[in-house]
Image (cartoon, rainbow, N blue to C red):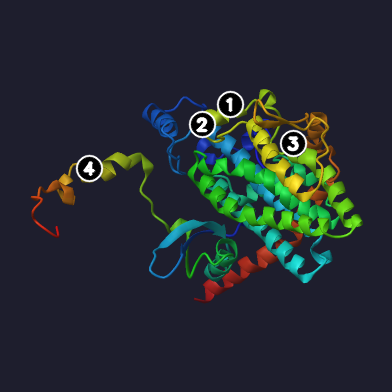
Amino acid sequence: MEAVPEKTMPEKTMPREAASEETATAAPGDLGEHFEATVARGARIEPRDWMPDAYRATLVRQIAQHAHSEVIGMQPEGNWITRAPSLRRKAILLAKVQDEAGHGLYLYSACETLGVSREELTALLLAGRQKYSSIFNYPALSYADVGTIGWLVDGAAICNQVPLCRTSYGPYGRAMIRICKEESFHQRQGYELLMTMMRGTGEQRAMVQESVDRFWWPSLMMFGPPDADSPNSARSMAWGIKRNGNDELRQRFVDMTVPQAEALGVSLPDPDLRWNAERESYDFGEPDWSEFAAVLRGEGPCNAQRLAHRARAHEDGAWVRNAALAFAKAGAAHE
Amino acid sequence: MSEWPLYEVFVRGKRGLNHVHVGSLHAPDDQMAISHARDVYTRRNEGVSIWVVRSDAITASSPDEKDPLFAPSGDKVYRHPTFYEIPDNVPHM
C-alpha cells in the first residue's frame, strides 16, 4: 500500500533536525560518502545516521502514507463486524481489523524515528496533506467484499510489502517484517471465506463474482502508476527505499492471482487477460488511470466519508487521551 | 494538550532468551505502556515478558563518534581464541 507519488512534502513537515541541514544532497563530506557507501553495499541506514534531507522526506512521506493506509483501512471492513454471518467470522474479522491498527502503529513508530511526531502525522492526514492508499476509498458493499479485500487487496499489499522488508531504512524494514508475517493470515482468511461462499448457493456465488469485478482494477492500481509516470520511483530505487518497480510488482501480482481465481471459480473482469507463453507471464489490460487520478484527487466513492470518520474518531478519543494523561500526572504527583 | 510520551518496548520471546527491542509506542504512564505493548507487540504469543522504558531515559552512543568509540577493540586480535596457535594433536581445545 505504498508508492503513490505525491508532491514533495511541504516545508513545515520537514523534521526539525533535517530542516537545519540546508541542501538536499550536499552532505558534509565524509557523512555523505558514508551514507552512499552504506546504501551501496546493501546495509541499513539507522535513525541516528546522517542522511540526505530528501531521503528523510521521501521516507516520511512513504511511511506516513503507509501508516495512514493501515488505519483508514480499518473502516471498510470494520463496517461489517456487527453484521458478520457467524461468531467464527466475527472473531476472525475483529482480529484482522485489530491487526490493521497494530500495523499502523508499527509504521507510525518507524516514521517517528525520522524526527516527526505522531501528532504531526495525524494532523497532516486530517488536513488532507498526507495521503493513504486509494483502495480504501472504495466501499465494502457485501460480506463477500470482506473476502475479496483479504484475497486481492491484502494480496496486492503483500506483493508490495515483501520487498520492503529489505528496504534501506532499518526501522521501516523491521516494521515490514512484522507486518508481512501477519498479512498472510489476512489473505488466507479472505480466500477461505470466498471458497466457502463459492460452495454455497448461486446467489452467494454471484455475490463473490460481483465483488471480484469491483475490486480487480482498484487492486491493480494499488501498485501505483506505470513506472514511466512515476517520477520518484527511480530515486527511491537508487536509495534502496524501493526494491522493485510498480509495473514489475503489478505483473507479479497478476501472475500469482490468475491461478487462484481459477481455483476459486471466478472470472477476472479483463478481456485482455491471457497467458503469454513467450514471456511466461499473463498479458493484461491497462487500468483506467483517469479513475486512479480522480480518486487521488479526492473524487473516489468514499474519500470524504473516510476522512470525516477518522477525524470524528480522533475527536471522540480526545477525552480518553487527556484523562489518561491527567491520571498519570496525578499519580506522579502523589509519589 | 501534549502528546503521550514515547516508550521503547523490549520483549522476551521465550524463557532463556534476552529481552529484545521490538519497537516503540506512546502511553500516558508505565502501566499503560505495558498494556499497550501487550496489544501491539504480542498478539500472537510473541512474548513471555515485556520491558518498557521511556525513550528519553535512554542514553545512546552517537553515530558520529562511531570510529573513536569502537576503535580500541579493533587492534586487539589477541582477545580472540583464533589468535593462538595450538598444535592439532592437542585435544579438546
Amino acid type assigned to the residue bearing label 3 in the image: Met
Residue highlighted by disc 2: A239
* In the foreground, A242 or A219: A219
Which one is closest to the eye, mark 4 or mark 3? 3
Residue highlighted by disc 1: A234
Q: CA distance from mark 2 to mark 4?
A: 30 Å
Badge 2 or badge 3: first in the primary sequence: 3
Q: Are marks 2 and 3 on the same chain?
A: yes
Quadrant of the rendered image containing residue A57: top right
Residue highlighted by disc 3: A221
How many C-alpha atoms fall within 10 Å of the one at disc 4: few (<14), some, or many (≥20)? few
Q: On the rendered structure, is A104 left or right of A148?
A: left
How many C-alpha atoms fall within 10 Å of the one at disc 1: few (<14), some, or many (≥20)? some
Assign the N terminus of chain A to one quadrant of the image: top right
Kindly state the secondary structure of the residue where label 2 is placed: loop
How many C-alpha atoms fall within 10 Å of the one at disc 2: few (<14), some, or many (≥20)? some
